[in-house]
Amino acid sequence: MLQVMMLLTITAAGLKAQDVEITVTGIRSEKGQIAVGVFVDDESFQSEKALLEYQFPKKGLSGGVMTFSISLKPGIYGLSLLDDEDSDRQMKYGMLGIPREGFGFSGYYHTGFTKPGFDAFSFTVEANQAKKITVRMRYIGR
């Protein structure tokens, strides 16, 4: 019994949240905020049901680049970012469904016109290791 309790304590201690530093590049304007959705699998991403959501005002934006951090427990995640220029937390679409605001994914630059699969932009957060992610924003329409 004592061994089981010790194992549970060690396991729980290993699940402390780790810092994930996110550097966003290619931001086109200082208006609005960067919205971040944290996803755990393809199903949650395709259904747009994020585990966590964050909004970061574009303070500290320099040369189209900004950096911020979030904390995540060890596991597999994917980040979807929106350059929410009007701060309404929703992507704006133009004719033919073309996005009018920028978007990006963790460690993956999306060049297609349909949603990528989760595996294309997923990453692993490991216990006791800080993680750095770069997201390059993409703009299609205006």
Image (cartoon, rainbow, N blue to C red):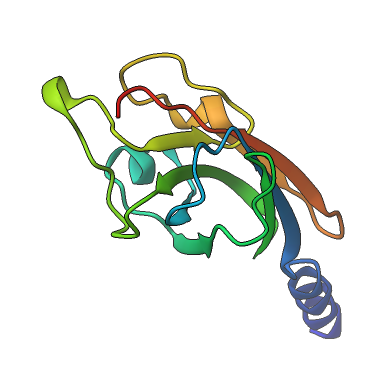
The x and y percentages for residue 21 are 73, 53
**With 34 as the anchor, is 26 left or right in this view?**
right
In the rendered image, the vertical position of residue 123 relative to residue 72, given as above or below: above
Q: Which of 107 and 32 is in front in this view?
A: 32
At x 47% / y 63%, what residue is drawn? 55
| Residue 88 found in image quarter | bottom left
**With 62 as the anchor, is 83 left or right in this view?**
left
| Residue 15 found in image quarter | bottom right
Q: Which of 51 and 103 is in front in this view?
A: 103
Identity of the residue furthest to the left in this view: 95
The x and y percentages for residue 93 are 20, 34
At x 85% / y 79%, what residue is drawn? 6
Identity of the residue furthest to the top in this view: 112
Q: Which of 33 and 15 is in front in this view?
A: 33
| Residue 100 found in image quarter | top left
Quarter holding the N terminus is bottom right
In the rendered image, the vertical position of residue 96 relative to residue 40, given as above or below: above
The x and y percentages for residue 138 are 47, 27
Q: How many labels does the image show?
A: 0
At x 62% / y 39%, what residue is drawn? 64
**With 141 as the anchor, is 107 left or right in this view?**
right
At x 35% / y 59%, what residue is drawn? 87
The x and y percentages for residue 77 are 57, 46
In the rendered image, the vertical position of residue 108 relative to residue 15, given as above or below: above
Quarter holding the C terminus is top left
